[in-house]
Image: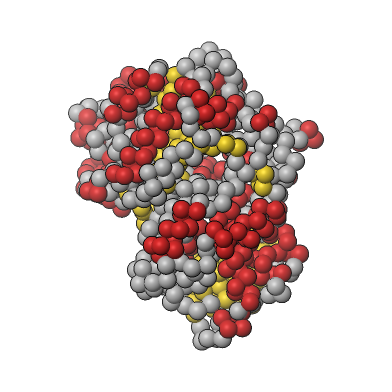
Amino acid sequence: MIVHSGEINGPVRETADVCIIGSGCGGGASAKVLAEAGKKVIVLEEGGHYTSKDFDGTEQTAYEHLYQQRAGQATDDLAVTVLQGRCVGGSSTVNWTISLRTPDFVLEAWKRDHGIQGLSSKELEPYFERVEKYLNVHTEPFENHNPNNRIILDGAKKLGFRAVAVGRNTKDCVKAGACGLGCPFDARKSVDITYIPDAVKSGATVFANFRANKIEITRTTKRVSGVVFDHQTQKPKTDFIIEAPVVIVSGSAINSPVLLLKSNLANSSGELGKNLTFHLTTAVLGVFDQIMYGAGGIPQSAMSDEFLNKNHDGGGFWLEAVPIYPTLAALALPGFGSAHRELLHQYPHIGATIILVKEIDSSGRVTVNDHGRASISYMLREKDLGYLKQGLAVAARVQFAAGAKRVMTLHARQTEFTSPAEIEPKLAASGWGMNELSLYSAHPLGTCRMGINPKRSVVDERCQTHDVKGLFVIDGSVTPTSLGVNPQITLLAIAEKSAEWIAANYADIKAR
Amino acid sequence: MNVLPDRVTTRRKFLKETLTGVVFLSVSKLVPSEALLAGELSQVPKDLGFFSPREYLIFEAVAERIIGLPSPGQPSIKDVGVASRADQFLAGADSEVQDQLHQLFTVVNAAFFTFLFDFRFSSFLNMSAPDKDSYILDWMTSKFGFRRTGFQALKRVSLSMFYTDNHSWKEIGYEGMFMPEERK
């Protein structure tokens, strides 16, 4: 059953075997596995529950209802915009469908540097396979790539860089391009239309517009309390208390540490909220003679991973396409005023290529501000800045190779190349300080880091907190490092594996 | 985001730096701009959820410069109702964001700060159009991180309120999202 806050008329008091806070990849997959194992599961989701009928294909509706802080979530200095879902299904409801397994070199580093057992490529293989089959992950035939993705396939290949079609979790996709705005066609196999309905079929209850504010550990159970918001006004309406012996925090790398910090739990290591990685992203925009219309067609269907871990240092970057919705384009284009407005007249001719940096020396931190909400800071350091610059140069070259007549970066002060020869000198003269280049993240990870050493990590290999038996964190916050790829398949696989272990060991976990 | 460890600007630090002391702020509020704006203030909607009437005018003036003036046949910010849409949008923002924006509008407009930062002798509202553009450019490219942050905040709100509205789409050639036939 999915319960909307409009159906709630007074304080909610419930008990369950497992209370899951958050309904994205981590929470949704955990809910399905545990409900199918016969556990009484309650899922709490801060955002609302929407269906394809609610998705009208506009940025206004999507940003207002489906995104954290209405797509305005950012680091405290506004230097990095952090895009995350805030609805049943979490970010899976608004992501751009790329479905990739965790790279082997990343999993090897987790074992080597963090002592993690049980998450090797071989051990995750059956989970990857199961998830991919369940979500219908497949690659697209060549004719399905839109002009924006063809930039990567054509441009990178011309330069001798590896570029391939990537897996997508869709079925009967009509290629409308609405992925980031909520799919009006139910073509994307996101958590809200896969894991959550299956969890509900097995008896799980999902409460939408329920924000957990605190977890308390009592002698016999765990108590999750919080506020119920009115679906329409978003004003507090009443409160709730859910008691369960097992609590799974699945609020994402931003909100999971906030909840645990406010609850004064799971932080004996002092690592809670630290080690934030962003998979830091920026873009180049090319202006082409032909119509590109980056808002239409499949938004992301190709990538170039030529420069990921190329130096065997665990870092690097790769290239993907990005849907070019009007507001995203307006915010990304440099400058302001009449010149900016004039630039936007090139909108149908703009192709965008994003650069995603797998961090090796940069990191951030999530703390709790005076209002009880997330405060996010981030430090971009030299090695990753180097890869960011290299990525911009490579992406610009790829754009030219694909036919762009001029290429711009997202620097506040317009940085434009009219030929490949201009790229390096103009980048060398550009500013790299805070808010001199627009930066984004759609993959924040790592703030409840997994590891075997309780002094250096928050959760163990099962995603159980070192400090509190029966308290788990299952979401993007547990990854020990940046992944270097879009994270949904990794998170779903880890969630399924951890939830299976919880189901199999429930009696022991429950016995304190 | 920062490239150098000694340039961390947390939200708290941003506020601290922005205000450069609450004393200055209180002084700036003494600058008599209300009297000069009496005519414009009477045009401001009465049922504002976030802006004060003065802030509404400041934002509208900033947004007009950031979005750019329309050519004939193109929508203006008043056609789209950018300031009213921003008021509704910001009325639902987190309280900490609201606090910061209230302070930002004061700092952007106050003659005290325009003098302090740029040696200008006028509040933003009283500047000429070229001076307004020059002043916003100074914020965008400032050596002070908090001013670049302030510019980003203003740019985001202004452009978001304009380009999420379908009246702005025709001008840039956006045709709207393909939707199922029965829901068009």
Looking at the picture, does residue B114 appear above or below residue A229?
above
Residue closer to the observer: A339 or B124: A339
Whole-percent x and y of residue A24? 59, 57
Answer left or right for A185 relative to A335: right
Answer left or right for B20 relative to B39: left
Task: Tell me what residue is drawn at x 25 percent, y 45 percent.
Answer: B4
Quarter where residue A438 is shown: top left
User: Furthest-top residue in view?
Assistant: B72
Task: Tell me what residue is drawn at x 33 percent, y 41 percent.
Answer: A385
Quarter where residue A374 is shown: bottom left
Residue B106 in sight from this viewpoint: no
Answer left or right for A349 relative to A199: left
Residue closer to the observer: A230 or A476: A476
Whole-percent x and y of residue B183? 76, 36
Residue A364 in sight from this viewpoint: yes
- Quarter containing the N terminus of chain A: bottom right
Whole-percent x and y of residue A32? 68, 65
